[in-house]
Amino acid sequence: MDKNIITISREFGSGGHTIGKLVAEKLGIEIYDKDVIRKTVEESGLHEKFVKAYGEFAPTADDRFAYGFIDLDSVDDSPVLQVWKAREKIIKEFAESGPCVIVGSCADYILREREDLLTVFLYADEKTKRARIKEIYGDSDLKTRNRINNIDVKRSIHYKYFTGREWGKAQNYDLALNRGSLGIEKCVDLIVTAAR
């Protein structure tokens, strides 16, 4: 396998965890998703709710100034910066421990200097995402639409702040796959083929 580390960034409702899990199974490698949160809690000593809230999302979708008070080069670590630094360390440790799939957590950016890295972005049309979220969470159509938009906006702001890159922009990834038109199995096959 030429690409030992596969990172999967994804729109909410596009099936990133499911696809990541199937890719890992087909390749016989580890997958890290919720493990990043658990290990970040251990590493930072911060409360799990805080790590979940600020580990991948902007504080609020409406407050685009929320990160204006966080200095990435600060010696005096804010809790949000502690989460970022702990997560960065953990993701690098996961990658060093052997071939794996890492879902979310800006892993594509954190590991960008690795030559054995394959970066993937999964997206889907609104209908596909709404159907998946309704199936998983049982939300109404309006609640589902709001949840998808809110989470994706928060991910986008967070990603831009910590990486300086546009979240979801195809040029920032090796593969950008439309899960809506391709389906889960085809996405899995394409990622596995690209990794070999």
Image (cartoon, rainbow, N blue to C red):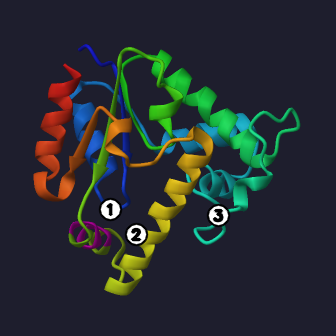
Counting residues from the start of the chain, the first of labels 1 and 2 encountered is 1
> Given the image, on which type of amino acid does mark 1 rest?
Gly
Residue 100 placed where, x, y %?
37, 26
Residue 2 placed where, x, y %?
26, 13
Q: Is residue 39 left or right of residue 135?
A: right
CB within 8 Å, label 1 to label 3? no
Label drawn at residue 64 = 3
Q: In 3D space, how far apart are the residues under numbered discs 3 and 2 (Cα atoms)?
A: 18 Å
Q: Quadrant of the N terminus?
A: top left
Q: Secondary structure at mark 2?
A: helix
- Circle 1 sits on which residue? 13
- Which stretch did the figure color magenta? 128-133
Q: Secondary structure at mark 3?
A: loop
CB within 8 Å, label 3 to label 2? no
* x 72%, y 52%: residue: 47
> Given the image, on which type of amino acid does mark 3 rest?
Arg
Q: Is residue 44 above or below residue 3?
A: below
